[in-house]
Amino acid sequence: MKVLMIGGTGFISSNIVKKLIEENHEVTLVTRGESEINLFDKGKVKFAYGDRHDKEFLNRIIDTDNFDVLFDMIAYTADESQTIIEVFGGKIPRLIHTSTISVYMVSDVIKNPILEEEDKHPLMKFWDRNPFGMQYGIDKRKCEDVLWKAHNDGKFEVSMIRAPYVCGPYDPMKRDYFWIQRILDGSPLLIPGSGDYASQHIFVEDLAEAFVDLLKYDVTKGKAYNIASEEIFSLNDYLDALCNLLGKNSERVNVDLEAFEKLPFSVSPEGHAFPFNTYRTAIFSTDRAKKDLQFSSTPFEDWMPGTIDWYLNIYKKPSVGYGNRDNEIKFIEKWKKYKREFLKKVIQ
């Protein structure tokens, strides 16, 4: 197939491009050309350099070639999706949109396991600390709304994938490394709340394969899919598995969420601080993907060693917020002392 991709040089999209090349699809990437390419051979794809918001630029692309499918990897607002509809609607038969499980998690209504039809529950009161991204989830809902309308109007045959935390080598969010580096330094780990809320990750190569597999099955047209690991981890379970792979047994100190949220290092401008702290259990059904895509996920113990190796031997930089690690450790010791003194008073 002739594939046009908006994006293509990011973490998820690079893995998709690599897979598309392996399966002999012809790929053209729309990109500004500002990102380093590490995962695929640049000589095996075509590039159209420009801004996705520039309609004249996009119209020139569609005027020069006939494409079978459009992957939009970087639509974050309804206006961005609407531009794609106005330029490419009726000219490319198929559109594959990168969505997110955040479309569910901006609602108070959560019934596990979460099915693909449960994306329209009323929005919760705006929660700026929503670990799944409050504004992000709202905007992605709006993207989906305009795209489903385009599908119903016959502009494209639309498919979507909604993924949770995406992990693996080259992850720009560095979520796993937050915990890897702290486990390896040997000091106690600060755990927000109980650490017992469960959710799922997805290995980036499994996600990329699911995106490409959409092209193989007509039944996927007009549908959204949850793509998530079959393994379910609470933060505590995840840390158990990670410590086992690293050969460590880190002390963990649980800090009440009310106190945690007041700590200056509980958030970071660098990215996700204390990731996988979901505040509530969120399990996503993958039954539809298993049925339509023959989807299965790679076990954590199979993909995580390579991710650890990449962080330690290739990335080699500090993890998110690691400059505050000393402050984390000092607070942990104060919290432990406070809890000891509190218990003494209660027992007396």
Image (cartoon, rainbow, N blue to C red):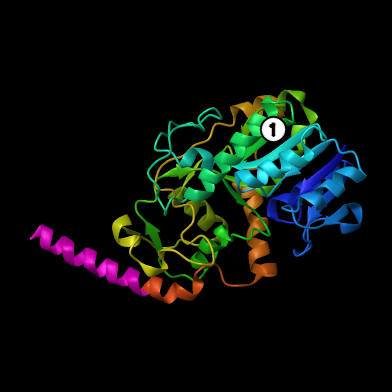
**For residue 59, above or below residue 325:** above
Q: Amino acid at mark 1?
A: Ser
Place of residue 129 in the rendered image (x, y in percent of width and height, measured from the top left):
42, 54
Q: Identify the image quadrant of residue 96.
A: top right
Region rendered in magenta: 330-348
Left or right: 298 with respect to 49? left
For label 1, the SS is: strand
- Rendered residue at 55%/39% (across/down): 141
Can residue 184 be seen by looking at this rendering?
yes
Q: Where does the image place residue 15, in percent across and percent down from the top left?
A: 75, 50
Report if residue 226 is visible in the image. Answer: no
Q: Relative to 196, is 97 on the left or the right?
A: right
Q: List the residue tagged with mark 1.
A: 159
Q: Nearer the viewer, residue 250 or 85?
A: 85
Where does the N terminus fall, quadrant-wise?
top right
Instruction: Using the image, determine if residue 266 lies above or below residue 236.
Output: below
Q: Which quarter of the rendering shows the C terminus?
A: bottom left
Residue 331 counted in the magenta span: yes
Vertical placement of 233 versus 291: above or below? Answer: below
Residue at the spot x=65%, y=38% of the render?
161
